[in-house]
Image (spheres, coloured by chain):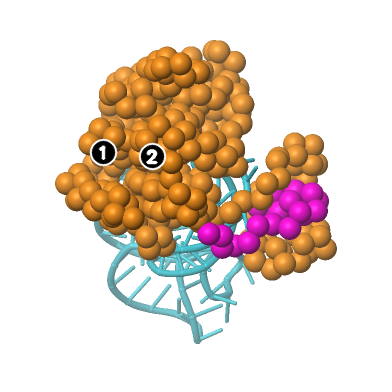
Amino acid sequence: MKSQTQKISLIIIVGPTASGKSALGIFLAKEYNGEIISADSRQVYRHLTIGTGKVMGMWKRRPKQDRGNWFVSDGVPHHLIDFVPPRRHYSAAEFCRDGKTAIADIVGRGKTPLIVGGTGFWIDTLVGRMPIAPIPPNTRLRAHLARKTPKQLFTQLVHLDPMRAKHIDRNNSHRLIRALEIAQAGVTPPPIKSVSPYRTLWIGITLTREEMRERITRRLRHDLRRGMVAEVRRLHASGVSWQRLEQFGLEYRLIARHLRSFMDKKTLLAQLERVLWQYAKRQMTWWRRNDSINWISTPKEAQRLVRIFLATTLKK
RNA sequence: GGGGGCAUAGGCUCAACGGCAAACCGCUUCUCUCCAAAAGAAGAUUUCUAGGUUCGAAUCCUAGUGCCCCCG
Protein backbone atom coordinates (compact mmCIF):
# COMPACT_ATOMS: atom_id res chain seq x y z
CA MET A 1 0.00 0.00 0.00
CA LYS A 2 1.15 3.44 -0.84
CA SER A 3 0.97 6.14 1.72
CA GLN A 4 -1.71 8.75 1.22
CA THR A 5 0.76 11.52 0.71
CA GLN A 6 2.79 9.78 -1.94
CA LYS A 7 1.84 10.70 -5.43
CA ILE A 8 1.38 8.13 -8.14
CA SER A 9 4.09 8.22 -10.78
CA LEU A 10 3.04 8.49 -14.37
CA ILE A 11 5.10 8.29 -17.50
CA ILE A 12 3.62 10.23 -20.38
CA ILE A 13 4.72 9.85 -23.96
CA VAL A 14 3.67 12.37 -26.54
CA GLY A 15 4.70 13.29 -30.06
CA PRO A 16 3.22 14.15 -33.42
CA THR A 17 1.39 11.63 -35.52
CA ALA A 18 3.52 8.80 -36.91
CA SER A 19 6.44 9.69 -34.67
CA GLY A 20 6.66 6.27 -33.06
CA LYS A 21 4.91 6.86 -29.74
CA SER A 22 3.27 3.45 -29.63
CA ALA A 23 6.47 1.55 -30.26
CA LEU A 24 8.35 3.58 -27.67
CA GLY A 25 5.54 2.99 -25.20
CA ILE A 26 5.62 -0.75 -25.65
CA PHE A 27 9.40 -0.79 -25.44
CA LEU A 28 9.37 1.10 -22.14
CA ALA A 29 6.44 -0.88 -20.78
CA LYS A 30 8.31 -4.12 -21.29
CA GLU A 31 11.46 -2.69 -19.83
CA TYR A 32 9.89 -1.22 -16.72
CA ASN A 33 6.94 -3.45 -15.91
CA GLY A 34 4.40 -1.05 -17.32
CA GLU A 35 0.98 -1.00 -18.87
CA ILE A 36 -0.23 1.45 -21.42
CA ILE A 37 -3.11 3.87 -21.28
CA SER A 38 -3.83 5.05 -24.76
CA ALA A 39 -4.67 8.75 -24.94
CA ASP A 40 -6.03 8.98 -28.41
CA SER A 41 -9.43 10.40 -29.17
CA ARG A 42 -9.94 8.13 -32.17
CA GLN A 43 -8.28 4.91 -31.11
CA VAL A 44 -10.90 4.53 -28.41
CA TYR A 45 -13.34 3.46 -31.11
CA ARG A 46 -13.71 -0.11 -32.24
CA HIS A 47 -13.17 -0.81 -35.95
CA LEU A 48 -11.20 2.38 -36.49
CA THR A 49 -7.96 0.51 -36.80
CA ILE A 50 -5.73 1.29 -39.76
CA GLY A 51 -6.74 4.92 -40.04
CA THR A 52 -6.00 5.60 -36.39
CA GLY A 53 -2.67 3.82 -36.37
CA LYS A 54 -3.88 1.53 -33.62
CA VAL A 55 -1.32 -1.04 -32.51
CA MET A 56 -1.93 -4.63 -33.51
CA GLY A 57 -3.48 -6.33 -30.57
CA MET A 58 -5.93 -8.93 -29.31
CA TRP A 59 -8.62 -8.84 -26.72
CA LYS A 60 -7.67 -11.41 -24.11
CA ARG A 61 -9.15 -12.61 -20.86
CA ARG A 62 -7.51 -10.84 -17.96
CA PRO A 63 -5.44 -13.22 -15.84
CA LYS A 64 -6.48 -14.51 -12.40
CA GLN A 65 -10.05 -14.14 -11.32
CA ASP A 66 -10.13 -10.61 -12.69
CA ARG A 67 -13.27 -9.61 -14.46
CA GLY A 68 -13.31 -8.84 -18.14
CA ASN A 69 -10.81 -8.68 -20.96
CA TRP A 70 -8.10 -6.38 -22.00
CA PHE A 71 -6.41 -5.36 -25.19
CA VAL A 72 -2.94 -6.81 -25.42
CA SER A 73 -0.30 -5.83 -27.91
CA ASP A 74 3.10 -7.45 -27.94
CA GLY A 75 2.39 -8.82 -24.48
CA VAL A 76 1.61 -5.40 -23.04
CA PRO A 77 -1.92 -4.59 -21.84
CA HIS A 78 -3.40 -1.42 -23.35
CA HIS A 79 -6.21 0.46 -21.67
CA LEU A 80 -8.84 2.82 -23.11
CA ILE A 81 -8.33 1.58 -26.61
CA ASP A 82 -10.66 -0.16 -29.05
CA PHE A 83 -13.68 -0.27 -26.77
CA VAL A 84 -16.27 2.31 -27.83
CA PRO A 85 -18.75 1.58 -30.65
CA PRO A 86 -18.05 4.05 -33.45
CA ARG A 87 -21.55 5.44 -33.41
CA ARG A 88 -21.29 6.44 -29.77
CA HIS A 89 -19.50 9.61 -28.69
CA TYR A 90 -16.74 9.45 -26.17
CA SER A 91 -15.66 12.71 -24.60
CA ALA A 92 -12.63 14.16 -22.90
CA ALA A 93 -14.48 14.08 -19.59
CA GLU A 94 -15.16 10.37 -19.93
CA PHE A 95 -11.53 9.82 -20.78
CA CYS A 96 -10.52 11.76 -17.71
CA ARG A 97 -12.78 9.66 -15.51
CA ASP A 98 -11.88 6.30 -17.08
CA GLY A 99 -8.23 7.19 -17.18
CA LYS A 100 -8.14 7.74 -13.45
CA THR A 101 -9.77 4.37 -12.93
CA ALA A 102 -7.26 2.73 -15.23
CA ILE A 103 -4.35 4.35 -13.43
CA ALA A 104 -5.63 3.11 -10.09
CA ASP A 105 -6.12 -0.35 -11.53
CA ILE A 106 -2.60 -0.51 -12.95
CA VAL A 107 -0.94 0.88 -9.84
CA GLY A 108 -3.03 -1.44 -7.70
CA ARG A 109 -1.41 -4.39 -9.40
CA GLY A 110 2.04 -2.96 -8.84
CA LYS A 111 2.61 -1.88 -12.41
CA THR A 112 3.65 1.44 -13.89
CA PRO A 113 1.15 3.36 -16.01
CA LEU A 114 2.41 4.80 -19.26
CA ILE A 115 0.13 7.27 -20.93
CA VAL A 116 0.79 7.22 -24.63
CA GLY A 117 -1.06 9.21 -27.22
CA GLY A 118 -1.51 12.08 -29.55
CA THR A 119 -4.48 13.86 -28.01
CA GLY A 120 -2.78 16.46 -25.90
CA PHE A 121 -6.00 17.92 -24.59
CA TRP A 122 -7.13 14.60 -23.18
CA ILE A 123 -3.83 13.98 -21.45
CA ASP A 124 -3.91 17.44 -19.90
CA THR A 125 -7.36 16.84 -18.48
CA LEU A 126 -6.31 13.48 -17.09
CA VAL A 127 -3.25 14.75 -15.27
CA GLY A 128 -4.95 17.89 -14.02
CA ARG A 129 -3.21 20.42 -16.22
CA MET A 130 -6.56 21.39 -17.61
CA PRO A 131 -9.56 20.94 -15.36
CA ILE A 132 -12.92 20.43 -16.99
CA ALA A 133 -16.40 21.06 -15.69
CA PRO A 134 -18.32 18.00 -14.57
CA ILE A 135 -21.32 18.89 -16.69
CA PRO A 136 -22.39 16.23 -19.16
CA PRO A 137 -23.34 17.21 -22.69
CA ASN A 138 -26.90 18.38 -23.11
CA THR A 139 -27.86 17.31 -26.60
CA ARG A 140 -31.11 19.18 -26.67
CA LEU A 141 -29.51 22.42 -25.57
CA ARG A 142 -26.68 21.97 -28.04
CA ALA A 143 -29.08 21.37 -30.90
CA HIS A 144 -30.98 24.46 -29.92
CA LEU A 145 -27.89 26.64 -29.61
CA ALA A 146 -26.35 25.29 -32.79
CA ARG A 147 -28.75 27.43 -34.77
CA LYS A 148 -27.50 30.69 -33.29
CA THR A 149 -24.68 32.82 -34.55
CA PRO A 150 -21.50 33.18 -32.52
CA LYS A 151 -22.53 36.74 -31.82
CA GLN A 152 -25.84 35.73 -30.29
CA LEU A 153 -24.17 32.99 -28.29
CA PHE A 154 -21.63 35.41 -26.97
CA THR A 155 -24.27 37.87 -25.90
CA GLN A 156 -26.02 35.14 -23.98
CA LEU A 157 -22.81 34.10 -22.31
CA VAL A 158 -22.06 37.65 -21.22
CA HIS A 159 -25.31 37.55 -19.26
CA LEU A 160 -24.94 34.08 -17.83
CA ASP A 161 -21.23 33.92 -17.10
CA PRO A 162 -19.43 37.25 -17.57
CA MET A 163 -16.19 35.86 -16.20
CA ARG A 164 -16.02 33.14 -18.78
CA ALA A 165 -17.09 35.55 -21.49
CA LYS A 166 -14.09 37.66 -20.72
CA HIS A 167 -11.61 35.12 -21.97
CA ILE A 168 -13.51 33.00 -24.43
CA ASP A 169 -12.94 33.04 -28.17
CA ARG A 170 -16.09 34.81 -29.28
CA ASN A 171 -15.97 33.43 -32.81
CA ASN A 172 -15.85 29.82 -31.77
CA SER A 173 -19.34 28.42 -31.61
CA HIS A 174 -18.22 25.10 -30.17
CA ARG A 175 -16.64 26.73 -27.17
CA LEU A 176 -19.46 29.21 -26.71
CA ILE A 177 -22.04 26.44 -26.68
CA ARG A 178 -20.10 24.43 -24.16
CA ALA A 179 -19.61 27.48 -21.97
CA LEU A 180 -23.36 28.12 -22.06
CA GLU A 181 -24.02 24.50 -21.25
CA ILE A 182 -21.91 24.85 -18.15
CA ALA A 183 -23.39 28.20 -17.24
CA GLN A 184 -26.93 26.88 -17.54
CA ALA A 185 -26.12 24.05 -15.20
CA GLY A 186 -25.40 26.70 -12.58
CA VAL A 187 -22.11 25.25 -11.55
CA THR A 188 -19.00 27.30 -11.10
CA PRO A 189 -16.30 25.93 -13.32
CA PRO A 190 -13.26 24.40 -11.68
CA PRO A 191 -10.29 26.62 -11.00
CA ILE A 192 -7.78 27.15 -13.75
CA LYS A 193 -5.07 25.58 -11.73
CA SER A 194 -5.51 22.51 -9.62
CA VAL A 195 -3.02 20.32 -7.87
CA SER A 196 -2.23 17.20 -9.80
CA PRO A 197 -2.50 13.99 -7.81
CA TYR A 198 0.24 12.59 -9.99
CA ARG A 199 3.95 12.87 -10.29
CA THR A 200 4.72 12.94 -13.97
CA LEU A 201 7.54 12.30 -16.37
CA TRP A 202 6.78 13.83 -19.72
CA ILE A 203 8.62 12.45 -22.71
CA GLY A 204 8.15 14.01 -26.13
CA ILE A 205 9.44 12.61 -29.37
CA THR A 206 11.00 15.26 -31.57
CA LEU A 207 11.74 14.92 -35.21
CA THR A 208 13.04 17.32 -37.79
CA ARG A 209 10.50 18.61 -40.23
CA GLU A 210 11.92 16.40 -42.94
CA GLU A 211 11.65 13.34 -40.73
CA MET A 212 8.09 14.22 -39.82
CA ARG A 213 7.16 14.58 -43.47
CA GLU A 214 8.87 11.35 -44.41
CA ARG A 215 7.26 9.36 -41.65
CA ILE A 216 3.83 10.69 -42.45
CA THR A 217 4.21 9.82 -46.11
CA ARG A 218 5.60 6.41 -45.43
CA ARG A 219 2.92 5.57 -42.94
CA LEU A 220 0.22 6.82 -45.25
CA ARG A 221 1.41 4.63 -48.12
CA HIS A 222 1.59 1.68 -45.78
CA ASP A 223 -1.90 2.25 -44.41
CA LEU A 224 -3.37 2.52 -47.89
CA ARG A 225 -1.74 -0.75 -48.85
CA ARG A 226 -3.15 -2.34 -45.74
CA GLY A 227 -6.65 -1.48 -46.85
CA MET A 228 -7.48 1.79 -45.17
CA VAL A 229 -10.02 2.69 -47.85
CA ALA A 230 -11.74 -0.67 -47.43
CA GLU A 231 -11.86 -0.10 -43.69
CA VAL A 232 -13.83 3.10 -44.18
CA ARG A 233 -16.10 1.46 -46.72
CA ARG A 234 -16.77 -1.34 -44.23
CA LEU A 235 -17.53 1.16 -41.46
CA HIS A 236 -20.10 2.88 -43.59
CA ALA A 237 -21.59 -0.43 -44.70
CA SER A 238 -21.98 -1.42 -41.07
CA GLY A 239 -24.06 1.65 -40.35
CA VAL A 240 -21.63 4.45 -39.54
CA SER A 241 -23.00 7.51 -41.33
CA TRP A 242 -21.02 9.68 -43.68
CA GLN A 243 -21.63 12.48 -41.23
CA ARG A 244 -20.07 10.50 -38.42
CA LEU A 245 -17.10 9.59 -40.58
CA GLU A 246 -16.77 13.27 -41.37
CA GLN A 247 -16.57 13.98 -37.64
CA PHE A 248 -13.73 11.54 -37.16
CA GLY A 249 -11.62 13.81 -39.32
CA LEU A 250 -8.39 13.20 -41.21
CA GLU A 251 -8.34 9.84 -42.97
CA TYR A 252 -11.95 9.03 -42.20
CA ARG A 253 -13.23 12.36 -43.37
CA LEU A 254 -11.26 12.40 -46.60
CA ILE A 255 -11.72 8.76 -47.50
CA ALA A 256 -15.44 9.10 -46.89
CA ARG A 257 -15.43 11.95 -49.37
CA HIS A 258 -13.45 9.88 -51.82
CA LEU A 259 -15.93 7.02 -51.49
CA ARG A 260 -18.72 9.41 -52.35
CA SER A 261 -16.70 10.41 -55.45
CA PHE A 262 -16.00 13.94 -54.29
CA MET A 263 -12.37 13.39 -55.17
CA ASP A 264 -10.27 10.95 -57.12
CA LYS A 265 -7.53 8.77 -55.75
CA LYS A 266 -4.74 11.14 -56.65
CA THR A 267 -6.41 14.11 -54.97
CA LEU A 268 -7.13 11.95 -51.97
CA LEU A 269 -3.50 11.06 -51.51
CA ALA A 270 -2.39 14.67 -51.83
CA GLN A 271 -5.04 15.87 -49.39
CA LEU A 272 -4.23 13.16 -46.89
CA GLU A 273 -0.59 14.15 -46.82
CA ARG A 274 -1.62 17.74 -46.35
CA VAL A 275 -4.07 17.27 -43.50
CA LEU A 276 -1.80 14.85 -41.68
CA TRP A 277 1.00 17.36 -41.86
CA GLN A 278 -1.27 20.10 -40.58
CA TYR A 279 -2.40 17.83 -37.79
CA ALA A 280 1.16 17.04 -36.77
CA LYS A 281 1.92 20.75 -36.58
CA ARG A 282 -1.17 21.43 -34.51
CA GLN A 283 -0.12 18.73 -32.09
CA MET A 284 3.30 20.30 -31.74
CA THR A 285 1.73 23.69 -31.13
CA TRP A 286 -0.16 22.18 -28.24
CA TRP A 287 2.87 20.63 -26.60
CA ARG A 288 5.31 23.40 -27.29
CA ARG A 289 3.98 25.42 -24.39
CA ASN A 290 4.27 22.53 -21.97
CA ASP A 291 7.61 23.15 -20.26
CA SER A 292 7.52 19.83 -18.48
CA ILE A 293 8.13 17.84 -21.62
CA ASN A 294 11.56 16.30 -22.05
CA TRP A 295 12.15 16.21 -25.76
CA ILE A 296 14.07 13.17 -26.93
CA SER A 297 14.99 11.67 -30.27
CA THR A 298 16.10 8.18 -29.42
CA PRO A 299 14.65 5.37 -27.28
CA LYS A 300 17.88 5.33 -25.30
CA GLU A 301 17.30 8.87 -24.06
CA ALA A 302 13.79 7.93 -23.04
CA GLN A 303 15.06 4.88 -21.26
CA ARG A 304 17.53 6.94 -19.30
CA LEU A 305 14.88 9.44 -18.23
CA VAL A 306 12.57 6.69 -17.08
CA ARG A 307 15.28 4.91 -15.15
CA ILE A 308 16.12 8.05 -13.22
CA PHE A 309 12.47 8.92 -12.71
CA LEU A 310 11.56 5.53 -11.28
CA ALA A 311 14.69 5.32 -9.15
CA THR A 312 13.87 8.56 -7.40
CA THR A 313 10.38 7.30 -6.66
CA LEU A 314 11.70 4.28 -4.84
CA LYS A 315 13.98 6.37 -2.68
CA LYS A 316 11.04 8.21 -1.16
C1' G B 1 0.53 31.17 -93.06
C1' G B 2 -4.26 34.00 -91.47
C1' G B 3 -7.82 35.31 -87.50
C1' G B 4 -9.40 35.46 -82.37
C1' G B 5 -8.94 34.81 -76.98
C1' C B 6 -6.31 34.55 -72.37
C1' A B 7 -2.09 35.95 -68.96
C1' U B 8 -3.41 38.75 -61.44
C1' A B 9 0.13 35.11 -54.87
C1' G B 10 2.69 28.52 -54.12
C1' G B 11 -2.50 27.36 -57.17
C1' C B 12 -6.10 23.67 -64.29
C1' U B 13 -9.37 28.36 -58.56
C1' C B 14 -10.56 33.64 -59.04
C1' A B 15 -12.64 39.53 -58.01
C1' A B 16 -11.52 44.53 -59.07
C1' C B 17 -16.54 52.04 -63.42
C1' G B 18 -8.77 54.17 -65.35
C1' G B 19 -8.53 55.69 -58.58
C1' C B 20 -6.05 51.77 -51.62
C1' A B 21 -5.14 44.76 -55.85
C1' A B 22 -9.82 41.24 -53.04
C1' A B 23 -11.63 36.11 -52.05
C1' C B 24 -10.87 30.79 -51.68
C1' C B 25 -7.27 26.90 -50.99
C1' G B 26 -2.28 26.20 -49.60
C1' C B 27 1.87 28.20 -46.44
C1' U B 28 3.72 30.18 -41.46
C1' U B 29 2.36 31.13 -36.53
C1' C B 30 -1.02 30.94 -32.61
C1' U B 31 -5.54 29.88 -29.28
C1' C B 32 -7.87 26.20 -26.32
C1' U B 33 -12.16 24.71 -19.16
C1' C B 34 -16.24 17.91 -22.67
C1' C B 35 -17.05 17.52 -30.76
C1' A B 36 -9.87 18.41 -29.67
C1' A B 37 -7.98 13.90 -35.75
C1' A B 38 -12.58 19.04 -33.69
C1' A B 39 -13.28 24.26 -33.71
C1' G B 40 -11.40 29.19 -33.91
C1' A B 41 -7.72 33.44 -34.70
C1' A B 42 -3.54 36.21 -36.81
C1' G B 43 0.27 36.86 -40.52
C1' A B 44 3.40 36.59 -45.08
C1' U B 45 3.28 36.20 -50.34
C1' U B 46 0.63 38.74 -56.08
C1' U B 47 -0.89 42.13 -61.57
C1' C B 48 4.10 37.81 -67.80
C1' U B 49 8.21 41.30 -70.15
C1' A B 50 9.57 46.10 -72.49
C1' G B 51 7.82 50.63 -73.95
C1' G B 52 3.74 54.33 -74.46
C1' U B 53 -0.95 57.34 -73.14
C1' U B 54 -2.56 59.48 -68.30
C1' C B 55 -2.32 63.49 -62.39
C1' G B 56 -3.10 58.15 -61.85
C1' A B 57 -2.78 51.63 -65.52
C1' A B 58 -4.12 44.89 -63.51
C1' U B 59 -7.49 47.75 -66.57
C1' C B 60 -6.31 51.78 -72.52
C1' C B 61 -2.35 51.62 -76.87
C1' U B 62 2.21 49.20 -79.25
C1' A B 63 5.66 45.33 -79.41
C1' G B 64 7.55 40.82 -77.35
C1' U B 65 6.89 36.09 -74.81
C1' G B 66 3.84 31.95 -73.26
C1' C B 67 -0.70 29.18 -73.42
C1' C B 68 -5.56 28.08 -75.73
C1' C B 69 -9.16 28.14 -79.84
C1' C B 70 -10.71 28.73 -85.01
C1' C B 71 -9.62 28.89 -90.45
C1' G B 72 -6.11 26.99 -93.95
Instruction: Kindly state the secondary structure of the residue where label 1 is placed.
Output: loop
**Quarter of the view holding residue A79:** top left
In the foreground, A18 or A21: A21
Q: Relative to A3, is A148 on the left or the right?
A: right
* Residue at screen point 50% across, 18% down: A67
**Relative to A116, residue A64 above or below:** above
Residue plotted at (71% across, 54% down):
A179
Q: Nearer the viewer, residue A8 or A253?
A: A8
The front one of A187 and A198 is A198
Magenta region, residue range? A175-195
| Location of residue B18 in the rendering, given as x and y in whole percent from the top left corner | 58, 71
Picture disc at residue A32:
1
Q: Are marks 1 and 2 on the same chain?
A: yes
Q: Is residue B32 above or below residue A47?
A: below
Instruction: Report how many numbered discs are placed on residues in the image.
Output: 2
Question: Disc 2 marks which amino acid?
Answer: Pro
Residue B62 place in picture, x, y as percent: 36, 64
Q: Which chain shows up in cyan? A: B
